[in-house]
Image (cartoon, rainbow, N blue to C red):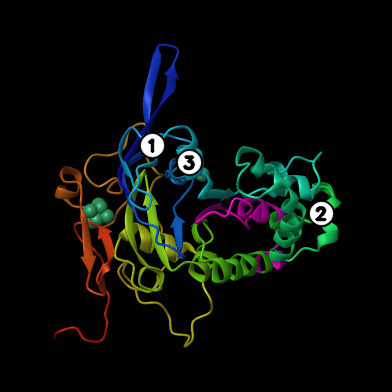
């Protein structure tokens, strides 16, 4: 459970000095045991920094992280190492993240070097075979090197390597976007199967919204260092409350409509493509009030003055959006 996470970086502005980049600007986030939390947003929204904080590679400037009630940033030495083991990472590009000089077996066993007590030496060979099989590779693949595998197979090795430390959470950063479309589904199925088997939670970072919809139990949408909307995936995808979420969804490829009617006009109408004006503002100079207001078609004066707080949606208290004028959706029960 993360609350109010803030992280700024000093970046050079000109020869004369530097400025501060607001990578995380008050992020609230909860990941539950055994679930998949989809994390979406355009590049530069803070997803990668958030992932690095969750992995404890980056210490937030402010805010809190509690992992099963424990503040990992307060831990030292062995305790810290033990905590780190619980959160692992699967990277976008399995080729860049795997040392080409190591065999699959060595790659999978490598994380045990820093956690020597986890798997006793005599059991390691058997455990490597087991991990290979868990991700759909063969025991005989243990001796092969990354360049001898296909992209999908390499990503399976990346997953086996993450699993070697028996994590409770795996942060998957665009885990299939470097793979051929035909291979993506296979790797996603591996992830889904492992979750059912092991109860591991995923923080699934992707800008492929159909993939997120397929994978996620809950979704958090980020914009300029903040989570602007979160909730059950179905609720967020079918009835987005935040204008930014609606814009993201309208730009995403969709399955063909069940009954082919033309989309109604007006940015509040579901199904219409929303074209946002302008660019994402620089995180070195985020707008006051609502960070999205410079691009929002609904913005009014108070949006510049007051930072909107999370408001629950009518479809359930779990679905929240940080907007003064959340979008309405006809649910069929609205009053006349
Ligand atoms: Fe748009 Fe205002 Fe809502 Fe921000 S708070 S998303 S500017 S309507
Ligand atoms: Mg990124």
Q: Quadrant of residue 193?
A: bottom right
Q: Which residues are magenta?
A: 157-185
Q: Nearer the viewer, mark 3 or mark 1?
A: 1
> Where does the image place residue 310, in percent across and percent down from the top left?
23, 57
Q: Residues within 10 Å of mark 1 (few under 14, many from 20)?
A: some
Q: Is residue 330 above or below residue 40?
A: below
Residue 162 located left or right of residue 313: right
Mark 2 vs 3, N-terminal side: 3
Magenta run includes residue 68: no
Name the residue carrying label 3.
52
Marker disc for residue 91: none
Q: Is there any visible trace of residue 196 in the rendered image?
A: yes
Q: Residues within 10 Å of mark 2 (few under 14, many from 20)?
A: some
Name the residue carrying label 1.
73
- Out of 106 and 300, give the one closest to the viewer: 106
Q: Residue at x 27, y 60 (%)?
A: 321
Q: Are marks 3 and 1 in contact (CB under 8 Å)?
A: no
Q: Is residue 68 above or below residue 117?
A: below
Q: Secondary structure at mark 3?
A: helix
Label 1 to label 2: alpha-carbon separation: 36 Å
Mark 3 vs 1, N-terminal side: 3
Mark 1 vs 2, N-terminal side: 1
Name the residue carrying label 2.
142
């Amino acid at each position: 459970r993360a609350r109010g996470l803030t992280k700024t970086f000093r970046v050079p502005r000109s020869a004369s000095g530097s400025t501060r980049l607001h990578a995380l600007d008050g992020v609230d986030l909860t990941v539950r045991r055994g679930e998949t939390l989809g994390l979406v947003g355009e590049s530069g929204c803070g997803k990668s920094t958030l992932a690095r904080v969750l992995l404890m590679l980056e210490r937030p400037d402010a805010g809190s992280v509690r992992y099963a009630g424990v503040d990992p940033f307060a831990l030292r030495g062995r305790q810290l190492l033990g905590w780190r083991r619980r959160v692992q990472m699967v990277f976008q590009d399995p080729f860049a993240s795997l040392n080409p000089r190591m065999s699959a077996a060595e790659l999978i066993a490598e994380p045990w070097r820093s956690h020597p007590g986890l798997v006793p030496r005599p059991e390691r060979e058997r455990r490597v075979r087991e991990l290979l099989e868990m991700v759909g590779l063969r025991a005989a693949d243990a001796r092969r090197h990354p360049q001898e595998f296909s992209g999908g197979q390499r990503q399976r090795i990346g997953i086996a390597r993450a699993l070697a430390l028996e994590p409770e959470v795996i942060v998957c950063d665009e885990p299939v976007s470097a793979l051929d479309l035909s291979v993506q589904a296979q790797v996603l199925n591996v992830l889904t199967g492992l979750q059912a088997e092991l109860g591991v939670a995923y923080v699934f970072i992707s800008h492929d919204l159909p993939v997120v919809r397929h994978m996620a139990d809950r979704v958090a949408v980020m914009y300029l260092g903040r989570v602007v909307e979160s909730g059950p995936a179905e609720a967020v995808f079918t009835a987005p409350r935040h204008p930014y979420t609606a814009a993201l969804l309208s730009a995403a490829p969709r399955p063909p409509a069940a009954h082919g009617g033309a989309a109604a006009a007006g940015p509040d109408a579901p199904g219409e493509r929303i074209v946002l004006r302008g660019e994402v503002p620089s995180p070195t100079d985020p707008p006051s009030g609502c960070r999205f207001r410079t691009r929002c078609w609904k913005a009014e004066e108070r949006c510049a003055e007051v930072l909107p707080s999370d408001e629950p949606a009518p479809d359930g208290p779990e679905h929240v959006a940080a907007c003064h004028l959340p979008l309405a959706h006809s649910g069929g029960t609205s009053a006349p």
